[in-house]
Image (tube, grey):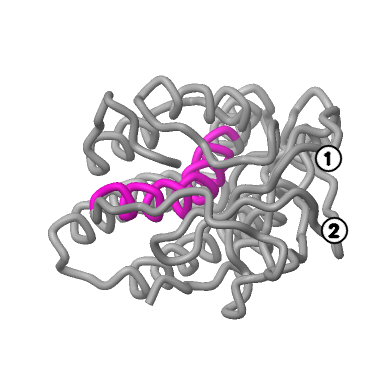
Amino acid sequence: MIMTEKEAHNYQLVKEFCEKDITDIREFIRDVKKKGYEFLQIENLYLLFPISIQKNRYMLIKEKKIENSGSIISLYKNKVYKIDSAYIFHKIELNDYTILMVDIDLEEQQVYRTLKSTKELIVYQNLNYLLLPILQLLSLKQVLKNCIEYSRNRTTFGMPIHKHQMVAQILAEGFTEYSSNKLYLIDFVEKLDKELITFKDYIENIKLIMESQQKMLDQLIPVTGAHGLLDESEVNKYFLEIHIIGSVFRYVNYIFD
């Protein structure tokens, strides 16, 4: 992402996105663009993450129906590079998009742009690394909503299951997890903006949040029983995406020393 003339403060932007109900990555990216950020992408390939300290391996997210074509634009330190091709060495299929792991031939890439503004570089780092955690957070919110709705409409022994102690406790813990992690993400961005934490610590904390959300999801899923496996519940869809997003993010390395 590169700052355009329309600037937005990191803290306010992340706070706003954490409050949304969006779980569609395309809609999410469109909203980010409206705020004044232009994505570095392979035409319609979204979200570029470095996954190697040798700066030759990257993770990409693209819409399923979009073919892999166009130039790759990548960031390393303060340099934006452009290359016409890359080798896909791993692919993960999700519901609406695909995660690709690619190798780039460093000898073929050319400097496309140099980022002179420190703020411009920080904005790229902050938002690029926060989009997946926020998307995972919002997916957890949707699972929580589905679980609450299902547990209120389903009864056992003449009582809605959300009133049973164990279910009520799990739902309460899920809500606490969502609310706390939303505040943590906002807090980390604010601290990073004020240089109270390093970018490396920032990334490590985000990874911990994502792991925590995966564990919380595993506790919530049994609340819906067999209903959660049905397509109309969407719980199973979010279950897979939350786990895959969390697992993939572990490969992301901090390489902006």
Q: Which residue is depicted at the point 62% across and 75% down?
A: 52
Side of 47 relative to 191 (left or right): right
Q: Residue at x 25, y 51 (%)?
A: 117
- Residue 156 in view (yes/no): no
Q: Nearer the viewer, residue 163 or 111?
A: 111
Label 2 element class: strand
| Image point (33%, 47%), residue name | 123
**Which kind of residue does numbered mark 2 sit on?**
Ile
Task: Say whether residue 16 is left or right of residue 152.
Answer: left
Closer to the camera in the image, 101 or 213: 101
Report the residue at 54% width, 48% height from top.
132
**Is 125 inside the magenta-drawn segment?**
yes
Most common SS among magenta residues: helix
As helix, strand or loop, the secondary structure at mark 1 comes to: loop
In the foreground, 40 or 170: 40
Q: Which residues are magenta?
A: 119-142
**109 inside magenta stretch:** no
Q: Position of residue 235 (x, y in %)?
A: 72, 37
Task: Identify the amino acid type marked 1.
Answer: Asn
Q: Give the residue pinned by disc 2.
A: 88
Image check: 26 left or right of 141?
Answer: right
Which residue carries the number 1 mark? 68
The crowd level at tag 1 (other Cα within 10 Å; few <14, some 14-19, many 20+) is some
In contact (CB < 8 Å): disc 2 and disc 1: yes
Picture coordinates of residue 98 (x, y %)? 79, 43
